[in-house]
Amino acid sequence: MAMGRDCERSQDVEALGNQRSRREGGGPLAAAEPRASWLSRLEHAAFAPVTETSRWYYLWVAFLLLVIAWGVYAYSHQLREGLIVTGMRDRISWGLYITTFVFFIGISHAGTLISAILRVSQARWRTPITRMAEFITVVALVSGAIFVIIDLGRPDRVLNVIRYGRWQSPIIWDVLAITTYLTASIAYLFLPMIPDLALFRDRLAGRVAPWRIWLYDLLSVRWRGTGAQWRSMGTAITTAMILIIPIAVSVHTVVSWIFAMTLREPWNSTIFGAFFVAGAIFSGIATLIIVMAVLRKVYHLEEYITEKHFVYLGYMLAAFALIMIYGNVSEYVTTGYKLEEGAEFHFRQLFLEQFAGFYWFYFIGGLVVPGLLVLFPRTRNIWGVVAAALLVDVAMWVERYFIVVSGFRVPLMPYEPSSYAPTWVELSIMVAGFALFALLITLFVKVFPIIAVWEVAEDQESIETAPARRPLAPGATLDPAEGG
Amino acid sequence: MRMTPSRPKLRARRARVFRASLELRCVKDMVDDQRDVPAPRPRLDGLQIGRRGFLRVIALGALGFAPLPILPSLIRAALGGSVVRSMGDAARAPSGRIRQWTMIIDLRHCDGCQSVGKPPQCTAACIQGHFAPEPMEWIEVFEGDLPGGGTQFIPTPCQQCQNPPCVNVCPVAATFSTPEGTVLIDQDRCIGCRICMAACPYDRRFFNWGKAPVPPEAQLARYSAEHQVPAKRGTVMKCDFCPDMIRSGTLPYCVQGCPKHAIYYGDLEEDVATNGEEVVAASRFLSGNQAYRLKENLGTKPRVYYVAGHGEAVGRDAFAKGRMPTKWPWAETVNGAKTWKR
Amino acid sequence: MSSQIVVKVILVSIALGAAAVALAVPASASHVEAEITTEGPAALQVKLRSADQGLPIANAAVTLSADESFGGVAGRVELGQASTDQNGVATVRFHRLSAGDHQVRIEYVAPSETEPEVATAFVTMPGITSQVYRSSAGVHIPGLNVSLLIALVATVWAILLSVALRVIAIARAGADAGAPSPQPPRGRRADKSISRAGATGGR
């Protein structure tokens, strides 16, 4: 509240500070605009989703709930009948569920890894998008973890994982890594949000429902912006952001090890961990771009999320597209050159037959074209980057799909290769999973600040003060009142 | 310390007092400077944080420890608590040594039951004995290509690996190696994640996708991991190597069912095996006939051995292709059961 | 001819490993002396001598078999075949016989004979207590075990806990900075913070 009130108080003071604002990226902030009005606009933009709810919002939530309800019905059908209602069978025993699980865990890297990397490297342009990235992480992890349980033949025995867990099993590594990652991600989402929650607590009191104020009050952990609190938060954020990078890498590595720890030819690869991590960050960036674009449009954040952000993320996307292409070349040239038992069949199905459409869509549409979209100056704009991101996300889902299914399809014994086609149950549950992802983001946006207000303000101010770097005279007293 | 911006930058900022957010920071810094020196209240006392604070501590603690239940299993593993369980005591030879069950399949004698004009009888006997639901063929007779163009029949039970990929990956030790060298599944513990099916390089694991089509009398059987009857929905099943049968002095169903006596079952520890007709010294039989194991390069170390052949000893022509498809004999099955495809 | 040959069969069994148990079992008489000894853990030696002169019989084919019963099937297990050398000794290597009494059948074709001669002997194989077959999967690398994983997980969670403690520190610092009130009305709280800020600033 100190923050909020002080900011408010400063408005009358602000008139004096007629400083130039040099917001990077050519935001609509006028050059001579007083800072106070800029700040109040920032606050307004942050408050808007919480305070104003349109009819469309309810319609959208209702639609998502409907989709989820259908998914729940499909799942109840699966619970009643068993996994027989899916298209999975003994020879292709994982399908859409595991694909979607891997995909969600992948896009969870959006968030935290990107946000943490950008924070560690002190990239200032990150500030308006970190909150979204961090939230994508938490939501994607929750959505993804659900799919593992959906895939179980005996979900009633899921606690056996804790009762009888064997540390030698890749699934246990996954449970460990994902729970750790989820906890760290929640912490990493929560910590930088504390000052903003305090701002909401102080500034929204009376304007929103009491339960929200109660929630903000609870979650802002008595934030008053004291030095000790800033220091504590700074330490905590630093610790969390450094810790979360290795955790995120470990998470997708062990997810890939679910496959790589088996003796199936297409998965028997040492590059799998690194390849999955790269793919995870790749799809994570794409998801972040899409969520950014949607929220920007819906909540009119054009001033803060600018073309620059899309282009920068687009560059990251292009860089990771190159890494992915390299990964593909490395993987398939080394196995294809030798063409061991099973590899020949796999190459045929992947490049020429059953999965050729998937593979070439993934390779051309998901790796080459997005890279080109970002690299060509004509398409290096918001629409181009968003189109690239959409392509990448679809392609990465497709990649997970053909990795899972084609890996199972290679015959292990002399039998006819089987086929897999998802049923309506699997499709419904998968769509419901995506709806859940969207719903959680939608609800989050309604409750929590989607823009890291204090970080954006700090970023803005550091840009402004950067040339005026002069040491403070020792003992100088700094008081807002004096300033006035 | 806050991460960004650094101290010098902060100092630089202090000059620009009139900026709102900066001002906020200044207030913070001042408060900081003043608060740090004299602690206004003792902070160490937990009671000082009050009831709500206490609740918060509890909540945070819960958050911090929520996923920790997985640790007990790690600690259990570290303390050496074995999760490998056998069903009762291991079978022992008269000398006290633990039996090491093995199966030797003489492909020279296997004609895929072409000559008897029936589906493979090992599979049929196994299905009968175990009430195996359709389409599970715990011992499945594959027809493999020969280099010269003909085919050979390869009856394939669970290979009972000594380095079992399925056991390695099971998250809950529902599938486990026994001291007798076999691999069993505890369907009461299996969570149905099917990673063992992904791991098995021999395609020897089967999942109960729905309510298994088994006859009603199967429901009366007393379940044990050594005798997986009745089938339980949502769990994995496979050939259990019938240690319960051999303990009671009879040979596994498949061995009994084979009309050509192509399948030997035995104990490597005592170096003996039988196909129901003759008894052989397992070691001499394996070495003398250049026995091999399937996919030996994978390092799974199976306990099922093969003697190369294509039924020539029982008069089968390698070019006589095809075997009859397996049929499940159940006249009636339990209510609501459905079959599925492999 | 066979009627003139005296066979003397002596089976000597040596236990696997250290302790040796010797058994000498004279077999049925014929005109060739055959002596059986075990050599090492898994070999039987058959020595054939002519009963009348005691000379070794070379180049005689010897087949050893024993009765075994397994899984309800009783049968004769062929232990192996060998030819006698210049000393009349044939060594038949086999893997193991199950412990207990066995009737070992010695089948040989003496020189200048066409029909095989059969002699039988009972032999008691000692119980071998140490397990021969053990699962040998895995490579043990000292220090690389579950403790390492536990240490890793514990470290990560300790760091996460330190982050949680920081949050508690924030809450405490907030409690110190301003008196916590269960349901603070906005104005009161805001005023307090302003006054605090003002007070501290004024100093």
Image: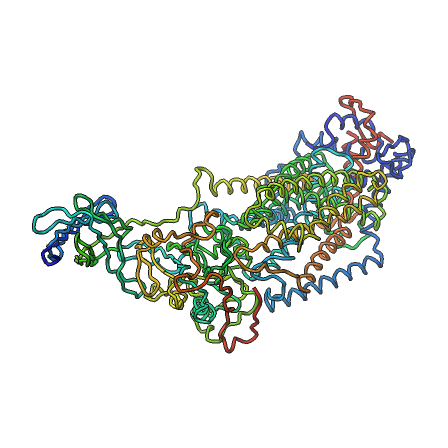
- For this orientation, the residue located farthest to the bottom is B331
Viewer-proximal residue among B204 and B112: B112
Indicate the quadrant where residue B15 lies: top right
Viewer-proximal residue among C196 and B322: B322
Viewer-proximal residue among B289 and A54: B289
**Quarter of the image where the C terminus of chain B is located:** bottom right
Q: Is residue A1 shown above or below C107?
A: above
Asked if one can make out residue A348 in the rendered structure from this viewpoint, the answer is yes
Q: Position of residue C66 (x, y in %)?
A: 23, 58
Q: Is residue B252 shown above or below C65?
A: below
Viewer-proximal residue among A364 and A308: A364
Q: How is the image coloured?
A: rainbow
Q: Position of residue A434 (x, y in %)?
A: 71, 56
Asked if one can make out residue A170 in the rendered structure from this viewpoint, the answer is no
Q: Position of residue A301 (x, y in %)?
A: 84, 45
With C90 as the anchor, is B340 left or right in this view?
Answer: right
Q: Is residue B182 shown above or below B135?
A: above
**Quarter of the image where the N terminus of chain B is located:** top right
Q: Position of residue A298 (x, y in %)?
A: 83, 51
User: Could you tell me how many numbered marks the image carries?
Assistant: 0
With A462 as the anchor, is A274 left or right in this view?
Answer: left
With A305 as the anchor, is A267 left or right in this view?
Answer: left
Indicate the quadrant where residue B177 lies: bottom left
Indicate the quadrant where residue A78 lies: bottom right
Residue at left offset 24%, top offset 55%? C99
- For this orientation, the residue located farthest to the front is C112
